[in-house]
Amino acid sequence: MKSISFVTIKKKSIIAGLLCLVSVISVFLAAVLIKPVSSPKPEFSVCIDAGHGGRDGGAEGKVTGVSESQLNLEFARTLRDMCKSFGFGVTMTRSDMEGLYSPTASNKKRSEMEKRESIINKSGADAVISIHMNSFALSSAQGAYVFYGSGNDKGFALAKSIQTSLCRDFDTARKTVSVGDYYVLNCTKKAGVLIECGFLSNAEEEKLLMDKEYQKKMCYSILVGLVDYFQMSR
Ligand SMILES: [Zn+2]
């Protein structure tokens, strides 16, 4: 039996110690130097604006009294989820029923609009879609309308693209796009549209606008129009 000298044992333990130290340093360096992999920046992004909110409920359903601000939010959330699953970046101007105005502001409407403008223009989004529900004295009025800001060519192209998609999917959708004098469209140079998804003053359409499947169908149609616009603007 070969005897192991004290010196050999000492050498082995020094080597083992050094190896252990090297592995500790490696783990430490890996933790410091290797950054977590972040998801790539989306090629396109959209700012989705749910109209009204807080004490400003907007229009009301003729039969159920449902508030426009609630339906705007439901449509906006559905559209947000679809845009995200399509790989688009999404900014929401509001994600709950709270108003965008400062609680202490004396002019709540102005405060709300300024906040909306700030979120839209700081979002870095390529397109802005503002969601509303319509109301009119004539109860037979129906269908989705798409508006763009005066002189905004990108807004016009986006409006045309979304309106074309809506006309393909909904017989009631208006056939032409219109200039709309709305703050959310006038406050930005981005491709912006305001969509009046339907009329809450029309009992039949009110029922449809509250239906989750109808909401999904319309949001998908809006998404298709948005995708077509992004492809054209590439
Ligand atoms: Zn509205």
Image (tube, rainbow, N blue to C red):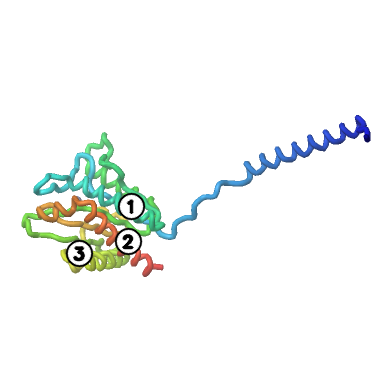
Q: Quadrant of the N terminus?
A: top right
Numbered tag placed on residue 44 in the rendering = none
Above or below residue 232? Residue 74 is above
Query: Who's the residue at 19% across and 50% down the image?
Result: 210
The residue at which mark 2 appears reads as 191
Q: Position of residue 212 (x, y in %)?
A: 23, 51
Q: Tell me the CA gap for discs 1 and 2.
A: 17 Å
Q: Position of residue 211 (x, y in %)?
A: 20, 51
Q: Which quarter of the picture shows residue 169?
A: bottom left
Mark 1 element type:
helix
Above or below residue 228? Residue 120 is above
Callout 1–callout 3 Cβ contact below 8 Å: no
Dot 1 or dot 3, earlier in sequence: 1
The residue at which mark 3 appears reads as 170
Q: Position of residue 231 (x, y in %)?
A: 38, 68
Tell whether 48 sits left or right of 140. Answer: right
Mark 3 element type:
loop
Query: Who's the residue at 49% across and 52% down the image?
Result: 39
Q: Nearer the viewer, mark 2 or mark 3?
A: 3
Q: Nearer the viewer, residue 35 or 103?
A: 35
Q: Nearer the viewer, residue 202 or 176?
A: 202
Q: Amino acid at mark 2?
A: Ala
Dot 1 or dot 2, earlier in sequence: 1
Q: Which quarter of the picture shows residue 7?
A: top right
Within 8 Å: ligand 1 and the Cβ of disc 2?
A: no
Extreme-front residue of the structure: 1
The residue at which mark 1 appears reads as 80
Mark 2 element type:
strand
Q: Amino acid at mark 1?
A: Arg
Number of residues whose C-alpha sits closer than 10 Å to that of mark 1, classed few (under 14), some (14–19) or many (20 or more): many
Number of residues whose C-alpha sits closer than 10 Å to that of mark 2, classed few (under 14), some (14–19) or many (20 or more): many
Q: Nearer the viewer, residue 223 or 8?
A: 8
